[in-house]
Image (spheres, grey):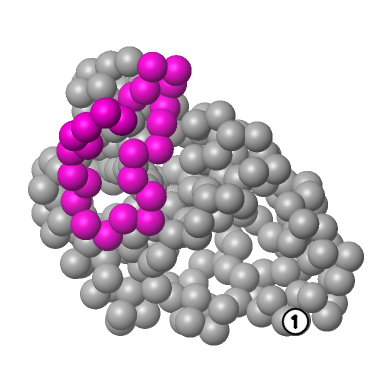
Amino acid sequence: MSDKGRRVLLWRHGQTTWNVERRFQGQTDIPLTEAGIGQARRSARLLAALRPDAVVASDLRRAVDTAAELTRLVDVSVTLDPALRETYAGDWQGLTNSEIEARFPEQFAMWRRGEPVRRGGGELESEVADRMATAIALAVEKLPDDGTLVVVSHGGAIRCAIGALIGLPRETWGSLGALSNCCWSVLGPGARGWRLLEHNAGTLPEPVIGDDD
C-alpha cells in the first residue's frame, strides 16, 4: 500500500446554504451554492495539475458536483461510492449547534467532550472511519505504484478517515482541524504506513526539503 509511493488527496465539497447557516448537514442532500460552484472550479484547476489517476466521490450531490469540476479537466471519470458520505446524524440533521444543544443537551455535551456518541441516533465516528477507510483502500489498490487518488467527500467523514488511516486514537481525531470548503488534505507513504503531508490546503503541495523529510 503506502510503500509504493501512492498519494491520497481528500477534498471537501464546496459551500452549501446549510454551511452558511451553520446547520448540520449529515447525509441530507444539499446542493452547492453559486459560491460553492466557484470554489470547486478554482480548486479543480489546481488539482488537475496533479494529473490524478482516479477520482472517487460521495454520491451526495454537493460532492458529485464538486468532483465534476475536476473530471471536466482531466481524462478520468468519477466513481460514486455511498461509503464516502458524511456521517449520518439522524435527528441532528438540519439543526444549528444552538438548536442541537437545546434539544439534545446530553448528546451534545458528550460530543463536545470527544466521547463516542450516536448523534441524533446516527453513526459513531468509528463506523464512519471504517467505511471510509475501506472504500479508500479499495480505490488505492487500483492505482499504479506512484498514482494519485482524489477522494471527494465531506469534512467530518474526511477527518474520521484521516485519523484512522494515520493511526491516531479515536479520542484524538478532534485534534485535526476542520477542512474549509473545497480545501483538501494529502496522505502519502511513510516508513510505518500513511502519514499526513498536507492538511486544509488550498494550494498545490510543495516538496519537503530538509531534515524532516
Per the image, the residue denoted by label 1 is: 99
Of residues 175 and 146, the one nearer the viewer is 175
Q: Position of residue 12 (x, y in %)?
A: 40, 57
Q: Is residue 107 left or right of residue 2?
A: right
* Residue at 23% over, 18% down: 145
**Picture quarter containing residue 25?**
bottom right
Q: Is residue 32 left or right of residue 93?
A: left
- The N terminus: image quadrant: top left
Is residue 64 among the parts visible in the rendering? no
Q: What residue do we see at 66% from left, 79% from top?
A: 96
| Badge 1 density bin: few <14, some 14–19, many ≥20, Cα 10 Å | few
Asked whether residue 197 is drawn in magenta, I would say yes
Query: In this figure, what is the number of numbered marks?
Result: 1
Q: Position of residue 138 (x, y in %)?
A: 42, 26
- Is 58 positioned to the left or the right of 11 in the image? right
40 or 190: which is nearer to us?
A: 190
